[in-house]
């Protein structure tokens, strides 16, 4: 009997669609309170996921969804840095 591996699904904070975890980018708030992109998926801390496009990042920023997910206010500079990393990486 073949083994069936389930694909981990996560919800994008921008478009609210369930997608395979590998298609999304993890945004993490470290124990020190720093918010950044986690392209490896290995950083410690609280995570939230977003699609790899600027539209979903803009939707999440506008609706303050990361602020809600991490229970803290995130400055615009952090969003700008994450959007830049998303374009480059």
Image (cartoon, rainbow, N blue to C red):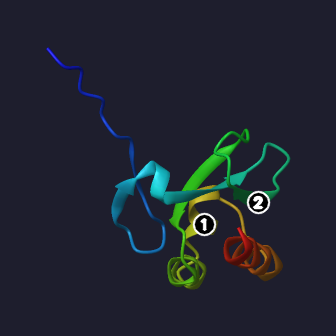
Residue pictured at 61% horizontal, 49% vertical: 47
Helix or strand or loop: what does disc 2 sit on?
A: strand
Could you say where residue 9 lies in the image, as x and y percent from the top left? 37, 48
Could you say where residue 7 lies in the image, as x and y percent from the top left? 34, 40
Of the pair 34 and 2, the residue shown nearer to us: 2
Hey, which quadrant is residue 3 in on the image?
Answer: top left
Say if 55 sits above or below 22 in the image.
Answer: below
Q: Is residue 57 left or right of residue 1?
A: right
Q: Disc 1 marks which residue?
A: 66
Picture mark count: 2
Image quarter of the C terminus: bottom right
Residue pictured at 57% horizontal, 85% vertical: 62
Q: Distance between the Cα atoms at labels 1 and 2? A: 9 Å
Q: Is residue 28 left or right of residue 59?
A: right
Say if 87 sits above or below 33 in the image.
Answer: below
Q: Disc 2 marks which residue?
A: 35
């Amino acid at each position: 009997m073949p083994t069936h591996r389930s694909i981990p699904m996560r919800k994008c904070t921008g478009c609210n669609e369930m997608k395979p975890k590998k298609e999304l980018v993890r945004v993490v708030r470290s124990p020190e309170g720093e918010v950044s992109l986690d392209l490896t998926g290995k950083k410690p801390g609280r995570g939230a996921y977003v699609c790899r496009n600027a539209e979903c990042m803009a939707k999440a920023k506008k609706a303050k969804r990361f602020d809600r997910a991490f229970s803290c206010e995130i400055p615009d500079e952090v969003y700008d840095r994450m959007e830049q990393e998303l374009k480059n990486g």
